[in-house]
């Protein structure tokens, strides 16, 4: 008779299910180089012969969603059926082959790989009955959070920002990553000043320009805001020479720099660190190959003395940040911006934050129980 331990060690993939989801947000989110009206994602479920189902939802790429699912079902799933769940590194290497065709859009393959890798981690956590942050060796039971927000408004922008800060604090979130880059550095500095005034000295204030500024503009903003105690300035420089220019902003202005979400591999993040360009790496596990690659980035960053956090995706990013020694924050959003985090997860508290902290779930894997009724109401296939 097979022992429980043997059953865990030999559990195999029997089926991979992908479910596309999409919902219209209550309002449009507008940043320097983006405008979002919908939230979409892919729920991936990996069924096993041990009866365990590993699952996670990933991404917000409306234009790529169908292509990602097609790649999972037609290219990746066939090679993984019968594969042992615990051989996650082998599975990662197998799915990585989809990125190799030279003329292929690698973003599609990387996102498909991320979906599978995320669900596999959940399956392993459930097989051994441990949350991922504990399985990874993290001792943290809580993680400090901030919200991405501060999107541009058509009018009363400064007053609206102050109201948003009050809303965040009432919701238990004591930090904001402020969107900027559409206005001049001086105008955006006024927006940052309004947030600092409304939030107080202990309120986490990060600023994200989404690669909108020239080096001169980034330095101007950093100089004007030098007394605002910014926790970080994120992707302040245009993408085509950002590694060099962010290093200059960091060294000249002395403000902490965050970047990494636009990198697709651990090697790109490594190069940012070698260039002394960043203090915080916010590599995106849903865009760059999954939690397996994110954890590699975290290990490299630890060697460089760089902090890490997951870009968005709190459904697994909070646990990942809590599972590594250099994890610093968890990035979340208010319910209007991320309805899936609050409504797709059935065991999620309606107001899950307290005094700026999030208490991690103790259920195994990513700790999620999917609300099947809500799932059916937002699925689009």
Image (tube, rainbow, N blue to C red):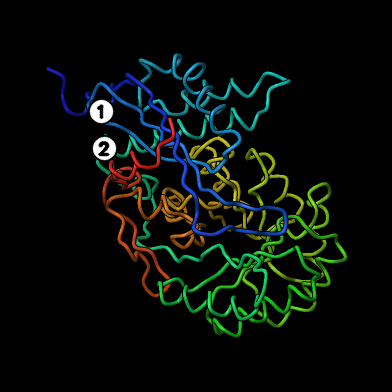
Residue at screen point 28% across, 50% down: 346
Label 1 crowd bin: few (<14), some (14–19), many (20+), radius 10 Å: some
Point out the image quarter for the C terminus: top left
Q: Position of residue 316 (x, y in %)?
A: 43, 48
- Which SS class for mark 1? helix
Q: Is residue 304 left or right of residue 251?
A: left
200 shown above or below 59: below
Residue 163 badge:
none
Residue at screen point 72% across, 54% down: 33
* Quadrant of the image occupied by residue 9: top left
The residue at which mark 1 appears reads as 8
98 shown above or below 352: above
Q: Residue furthest left?
A: 1
Q: Position of residue 163 (x, y in %)?
A: 53, 79
- Which SS class for mark 2? helix
The residue at which mark 2 appears reads as 128
Residue at screen point 47% across, 60% down: 336
Q: How many marks?
A: 2
Residue at screen point 28% across, 41% down: 372
Marks 1/2 in contact by CB < 8 Å: the verdict is yes
């Amino acid at each position: 008779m097979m022992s429980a331990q043997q059953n865990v060690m030999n559990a195999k993939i029997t089926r991979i299910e992908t479910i596309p989801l999409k919902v219209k947000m209550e309002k449009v989110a507008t940043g320097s180089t983006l405008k979002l009206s919908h939230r979409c994602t892919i729920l991936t479920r990996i069924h096993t012969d041990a009866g365990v189902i590993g699952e996670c939802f990933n991404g917000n790429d409306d234009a790529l969603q169908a292509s990602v699912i097609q790649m999972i079902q037609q290219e990746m799933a066939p090679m993984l059926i019968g594969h042992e769940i615990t051989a996650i590194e082998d599975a990662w290497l197998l799915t990585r082959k989809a990125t190799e065709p030279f003329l292929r859009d690698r973003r599609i393959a990387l996102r498909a790989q991320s979906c599978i890798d995320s669900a596999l981690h959940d399956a392993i956590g459930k097989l051994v009955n441990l949350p991922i942050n504990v399985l990874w060796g993290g001792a943290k039971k809580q993680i400090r959070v901030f919200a991405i927000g501060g999107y541009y408004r058509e009018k009363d922008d400064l007053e609206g920002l102050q109201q948003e800060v009050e809303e965040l604090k009432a919701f238990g979130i004591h930090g904001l990553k402020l969107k900027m880059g559409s206005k001049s550095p001086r105008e955006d500095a006024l927006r940052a000043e309004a947030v600092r005034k409304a939030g107080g000295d202990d309120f986490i204030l990060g600023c994200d320009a989404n690669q909108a500024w020239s080096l001169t503009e980034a330095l101007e903003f950093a100089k004007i805001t030098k007394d605002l105690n910014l926790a970080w300035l994120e992707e302040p420089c245009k993408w085509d020479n950002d590694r060099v220019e962010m290093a200059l902003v960091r060294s000249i202005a002395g403000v902490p720099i965050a970047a990494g979400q636009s990198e697709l591999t651990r090697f790109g993040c490594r190069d940012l660190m070698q260039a002394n360009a960043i203090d915080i790496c916010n590599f995106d596990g849903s865009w760059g190959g999954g939690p397996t690659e994110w954890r590699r980035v975290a290990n490299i960053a630890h060697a460089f003395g760089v902090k890490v956090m997951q870009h968005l995706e709190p459904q697994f990013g909070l646990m990942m940040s809590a599972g590594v020694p250099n994890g610093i924050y968890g990035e979340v959003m208010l319910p209007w911006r991320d309805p899936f985090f609050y409504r797709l997860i059935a065991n999620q508290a309606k107001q899950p934050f307290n005094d700026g902290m999030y208490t991690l779930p103790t259920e195994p894997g990513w700790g999620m129980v999917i609300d099947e009724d809500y799932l059916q109401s937002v699925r689009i296939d």
